[in-house]
Image: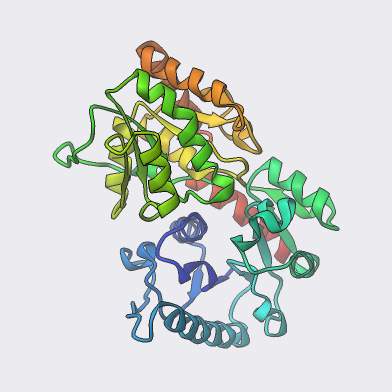
Amino acid sequence: MKILFDHQAFTVRYGGVSRYFYDLMVTLRQKNVPTRLSILLSNNVYLQESDAFRVQSFRYFLGFMPTSMLVSQVNRLWSIAQLRQNDYDVFHPTFFHPYFLKHTRKPYVLTYHDAIKDKFGEKFGHIDNASKELKQQLLDRAARVIAVSENTKTDLVELFRIQPEKIAVVHHATAFQHLTVPNSFQIPTPDAYFLYVGARNDYKNFLPFLKGLAPTFHQHPHVHLICAGGGAFTLEETGAIRQMGLENRVSQRSIDSDAVLYRLYQRALAFVYPSLYEGFGIPILEAFAAGCPVVLSRASCFPEVAQEAALYFDPESAEELQQQLQTVIQDEDLRQTLRQKGQERGRDFSLEKMASQTLQVYQQVVS
């Protein structure tokens, strides 16, 4: 069985969706499943740092947006050419652009990562450029649909015209489970800090999170917050940090390797995920793998993913957040218990399991 993936998710340097597809393709290849990625140009770090796929990096010679649009068009034409060759059994597009509908004669499988835009409408409308109507069209024509959590499957059934039997739930996994960081690899960090990972826009609930932790930080002047990735702080974020008197306690750090992020998880008092909604939450699994205690908002899929291996708070309650942060700071025994429970829970999510379950979906489609 030959599986063809397309370029769409790999137009960005980083990101959970591209990491998901990269790990899936590599693990399928390890299972001797022929996989191809139809892409010519990409600066995606997972592709650039790997020997598994041949891809050419590029410079933004026309400026960021014009160059990105030109590269996307080149990659799209290349993907169309690969589809027309018909040398595959199942096609797995990596995002929602419908260009492929006119060119594929084989069945396709669609992964649906989260319902944030479709559930909350224009409030978070910038998340993707695909309308609900377009997604419905793609879902209708897909042979099978993969949802990354039971919570996301429930959202799909509620939001779209789709039968539950058409949806297979395949949980995410993380390559951090197999990551080895030598003891000699050290990075400077505060002695005590909480860790926030990734983007900080709207539904990520970052500014309310900052306001909620401020009283706890004023009670514990030795504790810091590191925000890993997500780009430099915006003017609004910088102003909020300054207004709360936390300029020397809250920092943003770029992540240039998995080893850096792994070490940040490993040394943190806890990883805190305050989002209002997510489809899965891969950083939870990264924290589990690194032995980092986890504190989560009691929202969407988080209880499904972490179960009893995390502390929870109402994402709209500053008091609950403060209570859980205080507990983590003061109770070393609890932190150790959370580390152990997290590592145990993390073993339920493996790349091998994710790839095997996805392969079963492909086999059902072909048969």
Residue 324: x percent and y percent? 49, 20
Is residue 232 toward the left or the right of residue 37 in the image? Answer: left
Of residues 133 and 75, which is closer to you in this image?
Answer: 133
Q: Which residue is located at x 60 percent, y 27 percent?
A: 317
* Vertical placement of residue 158 versus 10, above or below: above
Residue nearer the viewer, 209 or 24: 209
Q: Which residue occupies the extreme front position in the image?
A: 243
On screen, residue 131 above or below 247: below
Q: Which of 267 and 250 is in front in this view?
A: 250
Q: Residue at x 57, y 25 (%)?
A: 313
x then y, percent, for residue 260? 27, 46
Give the quadrant of the N terminus: bottom right
**Quarter of the rendering occupied by the C terminus:** bottom right
Residue sitting nearer the eye, 208 or 351: 208
Task: Name the residue at 43% across, 23% down.
Answer: 215
Q: Please give the name of the residue rendered at 27% of the width and 42% of the height, measured from the top-left corner.
A: 180
The answer to whether residue 124 is visible is yes
Residue 187 occupies which quadrant of the picture? Answer: top left
